[in-house]
Image (cartoon, rainbow, N blue to C red):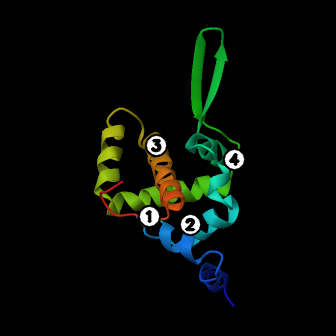
Amino acid sequence: MLLNGQVRDLSKSESYRNNYNLLISIPGIGLMTAMSFLVQIGEIRRFKTFDALCYYVGLVPRMYGSGEKMRTAGILKRGRKEIKVMLIEASWDALRSDPALMARFNELSKRMNKNKAIIRIARKLLSRMRFVLMNRQSYELGVL
């Protein structure tokens, strides 16, 4: 059996079915992204805050400081690289189907590089994923 078939079968199993259906209601999130997220994250409630989840995934800026000076330089190299990469790819896909994300991306692109803007969109997508899983309700386009 092909890997995609095995992942699809896993998504239909009792332990993943409900969470999988919630996640795929979000634009940009498909079979592989949803299942990779669910398998690697486990129980979403173990992250007390959204910032803790972002740090785990690695979608936070690297910061260097000394005294009163603070500098940021890209995103952390730590974290779950697979989830981080999938979220960034899913964000590019989500832009095409979610007008709110596209508007935010266009706004961010005016003041920063598009690659930096998509990181912000990936963080917003992660926020939506957390919200949907924590509140046990499907995503509705234009509501969150």
Residue 55 sits above or below residue 88 on the image: above
List the residue tagged with mark 3.
120
Inter-mark Cα distance, 4 to 2? 16 Å
Task: Locate residue 35 relative to residue 30 in the image: left or right.
Answer: right
Within-10-Å neighbours for mark 3: few <14, some 14–19, many 20+: some
Q: Secondary structure at mark 2?
A: helix
Q: What amino acid is labelled 2 in the image? A: Thr
Regarding mark 1 in the picture, which secondary structure is present there? loop
Work out whether mark 1 precedes mark 2 in sequence or the reverse, and give the earlier one: 1
Res 33 label? 2
* Residues at marks 4 and 2 touching, judged by CB atoms closer than 8 Å: no
Q: Earlier in the sequence, mark 3 or mark 4?
A: 4
Name which of mark 4 and mark 2 comes first in the sequence. Answer: 2
Q: CA distance from mark 4 to mark 1?
A: 21 Å
Instruction: Tell me how far mark 3 sits from mark 1, CA to CA.
Output: 15 Å
| 83, above or below 51, in the image | below
**Residue 28's x, y, as percent?**
44, 64
Going by the numbered disc 4, the residue's amino acid type is: Gly
Question: How far is the residue under mark 3 from the one under mark 4?
Answer: 16 Å
From the viewer's side, name the closer residue of 97 and 37.
37
Q: Which mark is residue 28?
A: 1
Q: Nearer the viewer, residue 18 or 78?
A: 18
Q: Are marks 1 and 2 in contact (CB under 8 Å)?
A: yes
- Neighbor class of circle 4 (other Cα within 10 Å; few <14, some 14-19, many 20+) is some
Q: Residues within 10 Å of mark 1 (few under 14, many from 20)?
A: many
Looking at the rendered structure, the secondary structure element under dot 3 is helix
Query: Badge 4 is on which residue?
Result: 79
